[in-house]
Amino acid sequence: MAVSAFDLFKIGIGPSSSHTVGPMRAASGFALEALAAIKDTCADDAPLRVRAELYGSLGATGKGHGSDKAVMLGLEGEKPDTVDPAGIGMRLDGIRERKVLALAGVRNVAFDWREDLIFFRKSLPFHPNGMRFVLVDGSGAAVFEKVYYSIGGGFVVDEKAAASEQMVSDQTPLPYPFHSGDELLAQCEKHNLSVSSLMLANESVWRSPEAVRERLLHIWHVMSECVRAGCINEGVLPGGLKVRRRAPQLYRSLSENPEAGLHDPLVVLDWVNLYALAVNEENAAGGRVVTAPTNGAAGIVPAVLHYYTRFVPGASDDGVVRFLLTAAAIGILYKENASISGAEVGCQGEVGVACSMAAGALAEVQGGTVRQVENAAEIGMEHNLGLTCDPVGGLVQVPCIERNAMGSIKAINAARIALKGDGKHFVSLDHVIKTMRETGADMKLKYKETARGGLALNATFVPVNVIEC
């Protein structure tokens, strides 16, 4: 099983990787497969209808997370990395009014979003984020159907892959394979490589080192543009909570009073908070973001990377590339050995993993040894263990936006603690990943992105309607 850095860092739209990006990818894939399946059996003018069913966490919080919108766009062939966020509203209005969508963009089929897009709280067998798509003929008989699972971070697998637990299908041999933190350390020390150098060698089996660098710098550019947009876009976030964007006012305050840093050394934390808030407010508004490793935690890696480029002496583009490669290596360990899905293990699998990734990456670009990098990553998760996913109203806003700011500060502090040590520590990264997985398994379902526990229950808000079955 081979996971690339670009499997973890995906360009998409908000507000959720598992509930927006994943369903859009699944729906788009279904549309193409369905058309291929009926090519020789259904006449071009035969009446067809498509139905989508969302289960488990998708059913419980899908409306707040934009799953319904993502499915409609995906069925029309849109992809998360290329869809134009500015045109989404008009596209969706057209589908709702006409009660017709263009399957994969090429064949009109009937679709009434009130009847053909259904949310169920019950889960399908293999993961809390399940989807079933069905294409039916004029008599109501199914001519093609398929089940998919959105397993976190925008990753999507079909029912066959989920049943076999083969969540990543790429079997490309890597020069320096690793499947645990201990194996990663051993490979680095045996071959005298940093974590980022090892990752670059592995990435080079898919594309040239120059192409890897170029693509990672493009990822960084999109992250930077997201921060910029979040600093200038005013207003109230969609969804009914009436959460006002705070990043623009904070940006103005910091920019208008640069002298504050002369007498308050903690002003740098205000800037880090700003970077994280800006990204996650854009995400909550459905803007363009980079999944890192999820959308709900998309602000942490960019915020800490902005801290590196703006406040760490000697920062460079080479450092940015090394940062992202190191973060990806750490993220891969969580992806393979635990989960990055809030619906599966709670927010420890999102904000916790992002914090761990950013902490280890910052330690590397600040001159840390491989063992200090591993220590920083471990600290970043250890103090997020048990973090629940309890979005108020099923929206990726409260507490998610602030939680990214807090996760960013934790990541910076984790790196600082690790860099002051010698890399020797009591709890290993493998220990904390195993603990995170077990903690997620023990966590009650209501704390796993269902909007039925924690702040989602105790903060006053009228929940969205779903079918209780």
Image (cartoon, rainbow, N blue to C red):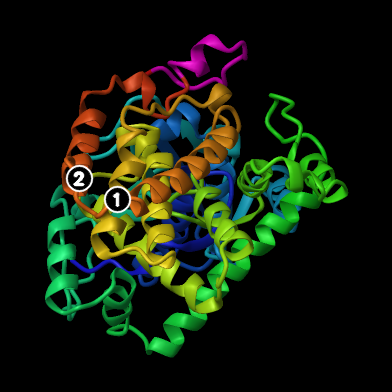
Residue closer to the observer: 147 or 9: 9
Which amino acid, mark 2?
His
Q: Quadrant of residue 6?
A: bottom left
> Considering the image in quadrants, where does the C terminus appear?
top left
Q: Residue at x 66, y 52 (%)?
A: 287
- Between the residue at mark 1 and the residue at mark 2, the CA separation in whole angstroms equals 9 Å
Q: Secondary structure at mark 2?
A: loop
Q: Nearer the viewer, residue 380 or 278?
A: 380
Q: Which mark is residue 54?
A: none
The answer to whether residue 133 is seen in the rendering is no
Residue 388: x percent and y percent?
39, 26
Find disc 1 in the rendering and name its residue.
421
Which residue is disc 2 drawn over? 425
User: Which span of residues is magenta-colored?
Assistant: 452-468
Task: Kindly report which numbered mark, 1 or 2, lies closer to the viewer in this rendering.
Answer: 1
- 419 left or right of 432? right
Q: Residues within 10 Å of mark 2 (few under 14, many from 20)?
A: some
Q: Is residue 399 visible?
A: yes
| In the rendered image, the vertical position of residue 382 relative to residue 446, given as above or below | below
Residue that appears at 18% across and 41% down: 427
Instruction: Please name the predominant secondary structure of the magenta segment in the image.
Output: loop
Q: Amino acid at mark 1?
A: Gly
Q: Secondary structure at mark 1?
A: loop
Tell me whether circle 1 and circle 2 mark residues in contact (CB < 8 Å): yes
Q: Is the residue 47 above or below the residue 388 in the image? A: below
